[in-house]
Amino acid sequence: MPKLLKIENAERIKAEIQSHFSVNEDARFVRRLDIILLLCNKQSVSNIVDLFGINATTIQRWVGRLNKFGFEGLRDKPGRGRRSLLSKADQAKLKKDIEKPPKDFGYDQARWDGKLLSHHIKKGYNVEIKVRQCQNLFKQLGFSLQRPRKMPDRGDPEKQETFKKNSK
């Protein structure tokens, strides 16, 4: 009998992988290909349902799309998912807002983050968007979240500056 490999924090890893499938179109396509390959290798739908936690009707729908449209039938259709709560005009305005520092809008923070953006959208656009969706919105608008570099506590600023000058 083959040795089982142990994955630490398996439930957390499993949840992260499931989350990745929900936001990555290519990952969903490859997963569907894997499932079709298992079906081609005579795996039962009930085994696949147990293995992947996918509804049997969904698998039947994928097989139907594969038979009708080929591999392209396994890709997501354009416009999949919920429509944005912000109009295109509001998104363009929001992008200009994000290009400015938060202090320009009276916020104490120096950088935008998901929590602040959620608050800003609720206040300025009267739309409630959760923090995680705001983090995705940064990417959609062409921004990346940047984290400040941590500095050591109780560091001597003069020694740090000297080190920076000498390390060039």
Image (tube, rainbow, N blue to C red):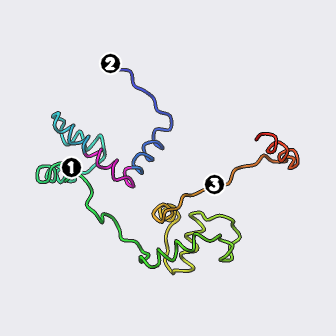
**Residue 33 at x, y percent in the picture:** 24, 43
Give the image quarter of residue 112.
bottom right
Where the N terminus falls, by quadrant?
top left
Whole-number angstrom distance, CA of label 3 to CA of label 1: 41 Å
94, above or below 113, in the image: below
State the SS at label 2.
loop
Where the C terminus falls, by quadrant?
top right
Q: Nearer the viewer, mark 1 or mark 2?
A: 1
Residue at 72% across, 49% down:
150
22 falls in the magenta region: yes
Q: Are marks 1 and 2 in contact (CB under 8 Å)?
A: no
Residue at 54% across, 75% down:
121
Whole-number angstrom distance, CA of label 1 to CA of label 2: 30 Å
Whole-number angstrom distance, CA of label 2 to CA of label 3: 47 Å
Residue furthest to the left in view is 68
Q: Are marks 2 and 3 in contact (CB under 8 Å)?
A: no
Q: Which residue is mark 1?
A: 59
Indicate which disc residue 147 carries: 3
Going by the numbered disc 1, the residue's amino acid type is Ile
